[in-house]
Image (cartoon, rainbow, N blue to C red):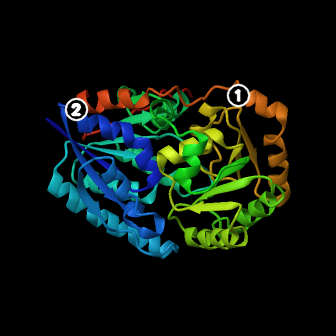
């Protein structure tokens, strides 16, 4: 039986991996080894390991490595601790394959440990570009340490091949996050109100704003600009989720907490909504606003408009439900007017999602269970034909 380890370090990542985790857990051909760490074990970010346990998945390793610091030095130390934790976990579990999703610093550390331990890595969401974040470099570095690749579009598949990966090991199956929209029984508006603890009796926006890690202040000024613009839409309630544990993330949290205190009746600020509540809110909100990848990847499936602010997602493929804008107050205000335009909103309802139709996890599962692993570790660089 193939032993498949899956690492998850954040609430969003776990939601995207849910159906792959569930499939391995239920499979008679594979043994699940779930490695849980990072934000999942932090009370500050909702202690979301509870959610994983409630879902009934056995946790093979709890990896404590996230320091209570969002400075560059603090996060670098967290990376070092993650590398040590991963090396020990892999030594104990001895998986045949390790599954990693995305581009965060934790994922890079886990991939490094796997490379040294000679554990093949299956990487999801490679080949993408996010020019405003250090995750851009992390993602491509993980690609070079991975052996099986599951991309979310054909353009991203071609980019992974451009990085020297064998086309036979690069699969375009779409984004697994869409599977949740198709397969989860989402909450209705009344159920969502009860689950969040706020009466959603009017229109609302869903807001997620993460640090922009290649800027000097992590986009604190940009978030201030967004909040100033949102004040001009007092008829809308706001459901705001915590930012990730990235550089300057706690400064963004402080700003959001102050905004919540100033607007207690209008603002619901939550550490983690979880996939069910988050996607249900996405379905009913007037728009998804901020700089999260979910606004580009999952939101279009609902036909819900997205206002994507700043450079954090710059370079990612997006559909016609997405309006991109700069991060000045005037640019954000202009973007808000576009997403609230009735004609644009009507067009969004007719849109299609460039990231697939919701059958990704099943294809990924079949491949990681059955793909031969014997000759994966020793990779050769796949050269594209160059014409001079």
Q: Quadrant of the N terminus?
A: top left
Q: Is residue 376 visible?
A: no
Q: Is residue 47 visible?
A: yes
Name the residue nearer the viewer: 35 or 315: 35
* Residue 349, numbered circle: 1
140 left or right of 225 in image: left
Q: Of marks 2 and 1, which one's residue comes earlier in the chain? A: 2
Toward which corner of the image does residue 322 lie, by quadrant?
top right
Secondary structure beneath disc 1?
loop
Residue pictured at 56% horizontal, 46% vertical: 192
Q: Which residue is mark 2?
A: 27
Q: Are marks 2 and 1 in contact (CB under 8 Å)?
A: no
**Residue 274: horizontal and vertical position, in percent?**
47, 50
Name the residue nearer the viewer: 204 or 61: 204
Secondary structure beneath disc 2?
loop
Residue pictured at 26% horizontal, 28% vertical: 371
For the residue carrying disc 2, how many other residues have a C-alpha within 10 Å: few (<14), some (14-19), or many (20+)? some
Name the residue nearer the viewer: 5 or 15: 15
Q: How many marks?
A: 2
**CA gap, disc 2 to disc 1?**
37 Å
Name the residue nearer the viewer: 249 or 170: 249
For the residue carrying disc 1, how many other residues have a C-alpha within 10 Å: few (<14), some (14-19), or many (20+)? some
**Residue 64: horizontal and vertical position, in percent?**
32, 67
**Residue 129: horizontal and vertical position, in percent?**
57, 44
147 left or right of 336 in image: left
**Residue 162: horizontal and vertical position, in percent?**
49, 35
Toward which corner of the image does residue 345 lie, by quadrant?
top right
* Residue 96, numbered circle: none
Residue pictured at 25% horizontal, 31% vertical: 369
Q: Quadrant of the C terminus?
A: top right
């Amino acid at each position: 039986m193939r032993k498949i380890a899956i690492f998850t370090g954040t609430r969003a990542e776990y939601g995207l991996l849910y159906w792959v985790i569930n499939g391995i857990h239920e499979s008679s051909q594979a043994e699940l080894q779930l490695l849980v760490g990072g934000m999942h074990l932090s009370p500050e970010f909702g202690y979301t390991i509870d959610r994983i346990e409630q879902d009934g998945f056995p946790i093979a390793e709890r990896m404590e490595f996230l320091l209570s610091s969002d400075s560059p030095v603090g996060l670098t130390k967290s990376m070092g601790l993650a590398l040590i934790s991963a090396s020990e976990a892999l030594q104990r579990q001895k998986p045949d394959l390790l599954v990693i999703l995305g581009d965060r610093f934790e994922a890079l550390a886990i991939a490094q440990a796997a490379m040294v331990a000679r554990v093949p890595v299956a990487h999801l969401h490679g080949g993408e570009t996010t020019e405003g974040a250090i995750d851009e470099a992390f993602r491509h570095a993980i690609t070079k340490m991975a052996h099986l690749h599951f991309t979310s579009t054909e353009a991203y598949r071609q980019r992974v091949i451009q990085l020297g990966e064998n086309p036979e090991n690069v699969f375009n199956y779409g984004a697994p996050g869409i599977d949740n929209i198709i397969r989860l029984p989402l909450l209705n508006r009344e159920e969502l109100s009860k689950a969040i603890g706020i009466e959603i009796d009017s229109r609302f926006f869903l807001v997620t704003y993460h640090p922009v890690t290649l800027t000097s202040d992590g986009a604190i000024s940009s978030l201030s600009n967004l909040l100033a613009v949102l004040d001009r839409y007092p008829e809308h309630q706001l459901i705001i989720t915590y930012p990730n544990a990235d550089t300057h993330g706690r400064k963004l949290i402080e700003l959001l907490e102050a905004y919540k205190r100033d607007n207690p009746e209008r603002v619901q600020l939550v550490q983690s909504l979880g996939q069910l509540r988050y996607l249900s809110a996405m379905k009913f909100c007037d728009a998804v606003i901020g700089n999260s990848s979910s606004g580009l990847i999952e939101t279009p499936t609902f036909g819900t408009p997205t206002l994507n602010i700043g450079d954090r997602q710059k370079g990612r493929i997006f559909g016609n439900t997405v309006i991109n804008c700069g991060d000045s107050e005037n640019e954000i205000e202009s973007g808000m007017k576009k997403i609230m335009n009735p004609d644009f909103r009507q067009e969004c309802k007719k849109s299609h999602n460039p990231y697939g139709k919701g059958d990704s996890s099943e294809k990924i599962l079949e491949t990681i269970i059955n793909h031969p692993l014997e000759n994966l570790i020793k990779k050769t660089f796949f050269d594209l034909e160059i014409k001079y």
